[in-house]
Image (cartoon, rainbow, N blue to C red):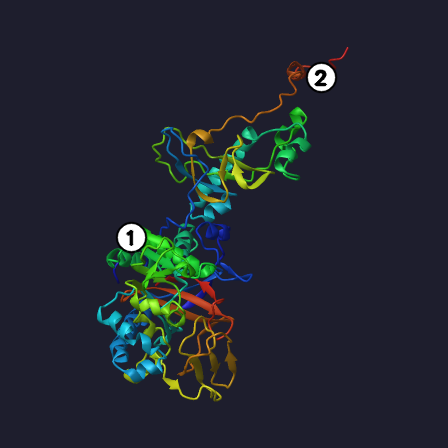
Amino acid sequence: MSKMTKRSRKAALILMVPATGFFLASCSSEEPVPSAVYKDADECAAFYNPPESCKAEFAKAEALHQQVAPKYQTQAECESDFGVGNCPQSQQQQASSGGFFMPMMMGFLAGQMLNKSSSAKQQVPTQPLYKSKDDLSTFRTANNQPVARQTGPVSVMPSRMQVAPGKMVNRGGFGAQAQRRSDQQSSSFGG
Amino acid sequence: MKKVRIAERAGWRSYAESVGFNFHTFDGEPYWDESAYYQFSLQQIEQDIEEPTEELHQMALSLVPEILASEQLLQQLDVPEFYWDWLADSWRTQQPHLYGRLDLAYDGKGPAKLLELNYDTPTSLYETGFFQWVWLEDQLMRGKLPQGADQFNSLQDQLEHRFATLNLLQPVYFSCVADNIEDKGTVHYLMDIAVQAGIDARFVGLDQIGEINGQLVDTDNYPLQSLFKLYPWEFMLREDFGVHLKSSKTAYLEPAWKMLLSNKGVLPLLWQKYPNHPNLLPAFFDSEPQSALSSGWVRKPLYSREGANIELVDHSGQRLKVDGPYHDSGYIRQAFHALPKFGDSYTLIGSWLVGDSAAGMGIREDNTLITKDSSRFLPHIILD
């Protein structure tokens, strides 16, 4: 047997990997945090990440997609922001609220997957990313914060990556009573 | 040694592009090919590749003072007389060298045969040192390769150590033809490793290099004290700026003496000095390069790159020739030794040296017996 292995102990790159993000230099004391952007779980795994973690993070982002994606009453409005063909009708909400439209998820920010021990005050949540019609090269959060121009490692400011429920035109505000009551009786509410 | 098929990693192309591997596909054809890998035993690697690589390297080094001491050999190698003293100085002052690659024909049995030495501008470095390393780690992590699989590939570790110990004056400039994507990838990789070794590494396009009173300078007229150039010495000597190479106070990588060993003329010189060495093929200077090549011989120009201008006639009389731009120097003849064939492909082993140590291996495949720029790169593993 020869000593140990016959390959390098590590093979890291620092110059060739573009870890720059869209954060701007500012007076705040906040430090950028390393994260990563991928199209899907397969691509995440192709970037030398554990496939199981990739699947888990992608599932988180997909689940969040329903909540945080910007929502539009009409497909035309949505497509004017995200491009023709990029705004399918939301399947989940269709039955109950008459349907609205949201952009397709184009990728995801893999939160703290690569940086679990971050000392940053705020965590970077795993979340879905989108691409606007006017700037198809940039991955953006649901809050329209630019994140990266290509998949792979990226640095982000945690404060800009916080998620909030997608702004939604609040329709169907009437009818809750009817729904509740319909469980008890199936007669008409007309009269 | 065997070839094993394996599924490609989904999405590897995006990953490759994100880490600077922009030449993974070449004219629409795959260059990096991970649809299969080659498997070797540790004994094959250590006895048949690693040890002969270091021995062949020492044999080649032993030729340098002999060539420098002989006007007849310098002429035979087509080295311009204007540079002889300067070349000899680079050897006498022990100008350090960085790396090199031996091309070997090996089929898993018997001695590997040296086809040629790439001692001036070897490429496929990034694919070997980084991308195939990541492929191995990745496939191990996915459980697609047997646990315990290893790779003959300490290239990046050894390069980093070499940069850290060369004592080059800084900044160290790195140069190549700036619009060549493959060369630039290789140079960026070396710069990356140099930075990791604590070196102030800067890029300067070859055509951006200037000259003031015989000193080569960068675009700000700062003297180039250390210059890595991925560009053939034999070109540099013959270009307009060649005259300044001698006067400039610059440590070059590779050093000037390395041009003697990247000359195909070392193949006949090795055979003369070490006749019947198991890792050598018979080779001779070709005094009649216009004559028809007989069966069982390969004709190569003294200076050529990437398989260009090589002509071979196999034992059955089949002739194969690659055209190219290298037809203005002398030629050598080398005994034909067929590359092993795995499936439809002929396989060549590139065995790396960093300094004087064997440092790893990269495998190329081609559909013909002559390995070229476009030949596919396949990863390998060691497994007993």
Q: Amino acid at mark 1?
A: Ala
> Which labelled disc corresponds to residue A97?
none
The answer to whether residue B349 is seen in the rendering is yes
Q: Disc 2 marks which residue?
A: A186
Q: Disc 1 marks which residue?
A: B197
Q: Position of residue B77 (x, y in %)?
A: 35, 80
| Residue A127 appears left or right of B202 | right
Marks 2/1: CA–CA distance: 77 Å
Q: Amino acid at mark 2?
A: Ser
Q: Position of residue A56 (x, y in %)?
A: 47, 38
Badge 2 sits on which subunit? A
Mark 2, Cα crowd under 10 Å, few <14 / some 14-19 / many 20+, is few
Is B288 situated above or below B166?
Answer: below
Is A39 situated above or below B193?
Answer: above
Q: Residue at x 51, y 82 (%)?
A: B319
Which element carries disc 2, helix, strand or loop? loop
> Based on the displayed image, in which of its 4 quarters is residue B165 positioned?
bottom left
Badge 1 sits on which subunit? B
> Based on the displayed image, in which of its 4 quarters is residue A110 positioned?
top left
Q: Among all residues in the image, which is located at the extreme left?
A: B93
Quarter occupied by the C terminus of chain A:
top right
| Residue B38 appears left or right of A136 | left
